[in-house]
């Protein structure tokens, strides 16, 4: 009997699969590429909410897990994935400078915010009030991660590229049977695809469409992540990733002219050099209104579990949430009530 059947191989599914394999558990993963939010994600990990100068929930704990998790994957897959470069928050006024100093003096934010304003001059971008530097930040090449890890699973005959058929799932007291194979547990890590899941579709997964651009700007000399009304991530060879939009109405993964225009307009407010749009990407993030992930066990079916709702911070949240769910299933460790699906007491599961 296989230990875990994992549905979805985005950031959440990969994180759980890797933790299971590290613990010598057996797995099988199903992926049909219906969801692409992990592939097109910005990939940033940032311990600070820069709009409000406040700490991300459990930020240091998540950053510590991120450092270990992606380093191990880099060694395993022989590829560079984690790029530890600072985020420079462009400051707009003396008032914002003062807000930065106040925030950097707070004990919970001090490990993440430089106490001095950086006045580095970058060709192609003006910042008369300087930048605030975020520490312990960077980005993960999510597209490369998914490509390499899915290839690794496929080579090990652990990944099946086909649509998971919920109707073929047989739930028994001692096992789960799917297409003639037996499993101890099923982990649903489908991202926005959760809406098609008959077991967990009543969970309040919202979904927020995001669009990104890859631009080429030979005269933009930026070697850090710049955060303003958009972020700019240097990719090398004069290429930069620019994002992102937030659309709560459109639930399609189709790039739009409106999204492109919004990003281009905001980019032109930030930089003053020519650029060319090389690629335009879109996806639907699995977001939740209370901004917390949704993990846990189905109240009626003890062998069915969900790992979802990573939202805009999937790179940071997925390894930590996968760890929490795995340790709950293997060792009985309680799930933090703020992310446990038990918090939705009004849902009727009948």
Image (cartoon, rainbow, N blue to C red):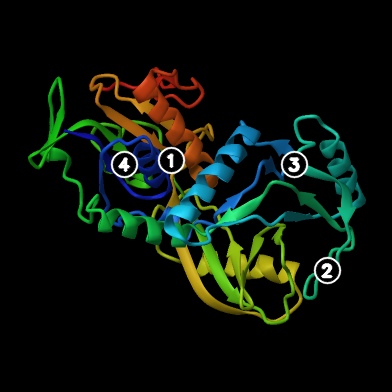
Is 227 displayed left or right of 96 in the figure? Answer: left
Q: Is residue 152 above or below residue 326?
A: below
* Residue plotted at (22% across, 53% down): 157
Q: CA distance from mark 1 to mark 4?
A: 9 Å
Q: CA distance from mark 3 to mark 1?
A: 30 Å
Q: Is residue 217 above or below residue 9?
A: below
The mark nearer the N terminus, 2 or 3, is: 3
Is 102 displayed left or right of 317 in the figure? Answer: right
For label 1, the crowd category at 10 Å Cα-Cα, with few meaning under 14, some 14 to 19 and many 20 or more, is some
The mark nearer the N terminus, 3 or 1, is: 3
Q: CA distance from mark 2 to mark 3?
A: 24 Å
The mark nearer the N terminus, 1 or 4, is: 4
For the residue labelled by badge 2, is the local secondary structure a helix, a strand or a loop? loop
Residue 168 x/y as whole percent: 11, 39
The residue singled out by tag 1 in the image is: 206
- Identify the disc placed on residue 195: 4
Tag nearer the camera, 2 or 3: 3
Tag nearer the camera, 4 or 3: 3
Residue 3 x/y as whole percent: 24, 33
- Identify the disc placed on residue 126: 2
For label 3, the crowd category at 10 Å Cα-Cα, with few meaning under 14, some 14 to 19 and many 20 or more, is many
* Residue plotted at (32% across, 60% down): 151
For the residue labelled by badge 3, is the local secondary structure a helix, a strand or a loop? loop
Residue nearest the viewer, comparing 54 with 114 = 114
């Amino acid at each position: 009997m296989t230990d875990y059947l994992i549905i979805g191989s985005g950031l959440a599914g990969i994180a759980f699969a890797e933790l299971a394999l590290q613990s010598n558990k057996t797995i099988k993963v199903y992926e049909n590429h219906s969801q692409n939010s992990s592939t097109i994600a910005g990939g940033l990990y940032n311990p600070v909410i820069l709009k409000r100068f406040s700490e991300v929930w459990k930020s240091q704990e998540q950053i510590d897990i991120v450092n270990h998790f992606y380093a191990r994957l880099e060694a395993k897959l022989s590829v560079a994935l984690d790029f530890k470069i600072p985020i420079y928050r462009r400051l707009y006024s003396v008032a914002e400078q003062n807000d930065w100093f106040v925030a950097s003096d707070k004990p919970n934010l001090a490990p993440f915010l430089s106490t001095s304003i950086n006045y580095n001059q970058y060709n192609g971008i003006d910042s008369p009030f300087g930048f605030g530097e975020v520490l312990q930040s960077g980005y993960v090449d999510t597209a490369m991660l998914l490509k390499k890890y899915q290839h690794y699973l496929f080579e090990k005959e652990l990944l099946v590229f086909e649509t998971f058929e919920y109707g073929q799932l047989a739930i028994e007291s001692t096992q789960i049977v799917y297409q003639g194979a037996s499993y101890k547990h099923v982990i649903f890590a489908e991202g926005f695809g959760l809406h098609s899941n008959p077991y967990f579709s009543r969970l309040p997964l919202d979904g927020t469409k995001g669009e990104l651009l890859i631009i080429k700007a030979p005269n933009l000399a930026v070697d850090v992540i710049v955060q303003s009304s958009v972020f700019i991530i240097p990719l090398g060879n004069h290429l930069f990733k620019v994002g992102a939009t937030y659309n709560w109405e459109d639930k399609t993964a189709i790039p739009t002219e409106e999204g492109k225009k919004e990003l281009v307009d905001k980019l032109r407010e930030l930089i003053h050099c020519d650029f060319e749009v090389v690629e335009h990407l879109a996806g639907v993030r699995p977001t939740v209104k209370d901004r917390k992930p949704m993990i846990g066990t189905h109240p009626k079916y003890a062998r069915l579990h969900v790992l979802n709702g990573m939202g805009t911070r999937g790179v940071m949240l997925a390894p930590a949430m996968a760890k929490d769910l795995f340790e709950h299933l293997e060792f009985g460790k309680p799930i933090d009530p703020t992310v446990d699906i038990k918090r939705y007491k009004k849902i009727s599961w009948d």
